[in-house]
Image (cartoon, rainbow, N blue to C red):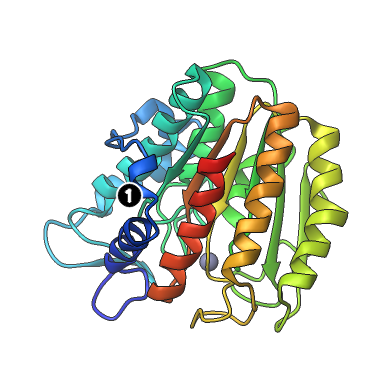
Amino acid sequence: MGPYHPECPERLTAIADRLIAAGLDVHLTPFEAPAATDEQLRRVHSEAYLDELEAANPESGLHYIDPDTALNPHTLAAARHAAGAAVLATDLVVAGTCRTAFCPVRPPGHHAERRRAMGFCIYNSVAVGARHALEAHGLARVAVVDFDVHHGNGTEDIFTDDPRVLMVSTFQHPLYPYSGFESNAANMVNVPLAAGSGGDEFREAVRERWLPALDAFRPELIYISAGFDAHREDPLAGLNFTESDYAWVTRELCSVAARHARGRVVSLLEGGYSLSALGRSAASHVRELIAS
Ligand SMILES: [Zn+2]
């Protein structure tokens, strides 16, 4: 995304380092993310949008789609592999090869709408995974859970009124992208949190709003848009979550998955821009995915 941009390659190193430091790497099976195919991307993005991106792909330097979302010559390939990670993870958990999967991918995806890139996001990876579960594997119902500090406007745009998908989310409001607080669609359970909210407010939202909706919906697979930028140390926002909140919510979601989805959870990295807090939070999240 250019120099000094918070969505930087070091984010993935920070996570990998913490997984090693926490002794978790020995419990993980690594897989190489394949590139998502055109057919898989077309399940969530319009043909015109995908063509526009290919046409904008620069041979050198940066092409700015908006002031904070850029393409370099490798971005589209990286984004295709990020979406492909969601596809492979879906294949693995549906086949029973893995019970849970964590995809530490860049760029993130949850702001990418059907026809628009924005907010560092190009392809909506979690949506590509969810539609793959529905259309390639024939699942009837999947849930998308989003605890990134920013509202997942792209995921909402893609799945609004798709009765096969339930989206539950929390996000700081008001904050970029200034959406989600007036959703009317029956399959969207969005809970805005005021600046300064911490674990107590988050856990209340999960207990009061998410869990009843998830249990009523009975998803056959749970996707997590795992952004860790609601952490108290994150420089881009003003919520006060800690590692223990991420561990707690992961346990709760794994319990829902155990009740309805044979334990199947696919988690994809979204935001998280304090490198230290990102690494610690992701490790707390992955530890619970392993333990489930
Ligand atoms: Zn975010």
288 or 236, which lies in front? Answer: 288
Q: Is mark 1 within 8 Å of ligand 1?
A: no
227 or 264, which lies in front? Answer: 264
On the image, the x and y values in percent for residue 79 come to: 33, 48
What residue type is disc 1 on? Answer: Leu
Which quarter shows the C terminus?
Answer: top right
Q: Is residue 63 left or right of residue 167?
A: left
110 or 149, which lies in front? Answer: 149
- In the figure, 209 relative to 3: above or below? above
**Residue 87 visible, this angle:** yes
72 or 289, which lies in front? Answer: 289
Q: Residues within 10 Å of mark 1 (few under 14, many from 20)?
A: some
- In the figure, 14 relative to 85: above or below? below
Q: Is residue 37 left or right of residue 179?
A: left
Dot 1 corresponds to which residue?
A: 53
On the image, the x and y values in percent for residue 43 come to: 50, 30
Secondary structure beneath label 1? helix
Residue at screen point 39% across, 50% down:
24
Residue at screen point 34% across, 35% down:
29
Which quarter shows the N terminus?
Answer: bottom left
Total count of labels? 1
Residue at screen point 42% across, 35% down:
41
Q: Is residue 226 left or right of residue 249?
A: left
On the image, the x and y values in percent for residue 236 come to: 51, 80
Residue at screen point 75% across, 66% down:
202
**Residue 183 visible, this angle:** no
On the image, the x and y values in percent for residue 35 come to: 29, 35
- In the figure, 4 relative to 163: above or below? below
